[in-house]
Image: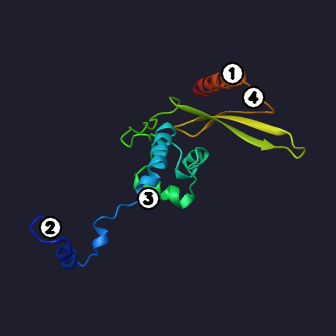
Amino acid sequence: MERGLSQRRVCALLQLSRSMLSYEHKRATQDAPAVERMKELAAQYPRYGYRLVRIFPARDGHRMSASRAWRLWSSERLQVPRKRPRRRVAASRPCPWAPDRANPVWSYDFVFDACANGQQLKRLTVIDECTKEALAIDVAGSIRSARVIEMCCAGSSNQASRRR
């Protein structure tokens, strides 16, 4: 039409109906208040998706089905932010060195078992990392922290007495 052709001629060339030139979508004007409300709620509640957000405009009188809420949500490109992944241990972290001689590194562990009568038994094992030798084993129903410290010290005295 800017080049001097009539509306009829342009519509005939493009194979469009003339009524389409003056057509205005009513849906955009009808949905505008609900869309604005959804945008406000998405900013206020960032972890809510379209299913939860559609409940609030319904209370204000903007009734909508789940499919309409999805259409409005996706047309406005609203979305729940992605969850941040957990921080993982760096792959370049140096590996601990293996002990090269006996007695510099010990490890201790608790092993649990049960008797025939159902009573729980705990075993504290103190092991030398290099030789894999058990320095001390303590079995009891309950082992408190003072006893753990005592066993670790006893493991060192047992090791010292074996060297003599």
Return the disc, 4 or 3, that comes first in the chain's sequence: 3
Residue at 72% x, 23% y: name it: 147
The residue where tag 1 is placed is 150
Depth check: 81 or 124 in front?
81
Name the side, left or right, on which 110 lies relative to 71: right
Of pointers 1 and 2, the one earlier in the residue sequence: 2
**Label 4 SS:** loop
Q: In which quarter of the view is residue 131 placed?
A: top right
> Gap in Å between the C-alphas at discs 2 and 4?
93 Å
Q: Which residue is mark 4?
A: 143
Question: Residue beneath label 3, please?
Answer: 27
Secondary structure of the residue carrying numbered label 3: helix
Work out which quarter of the rendered image holds the N terminus and state it: bottom left
Q: Which of labels 3 and 2 is toward the front? A: 2
Residue bearing the label numbered 2:
1
In the image, what residue type sits under mark 2?
Met
State yes or no: discs 2 and 4 in contact (Cβ < 8 Å): no
What residue type is disc 4 on?
A: Ile
What amino acid type should be assigned to the residue bearing mark 1? Glu
Mark 1 surroundings within 10 Å by alpha-carbon count, few (fewer than 14), some (14 through 19), many (20 or more):
few
- Local crowd size for mark 4, using a 10 Å CA cut-off: few (<14), some (14–19), many (≥20): some
Tag 1 near tag 2, CB within 8 Å: no
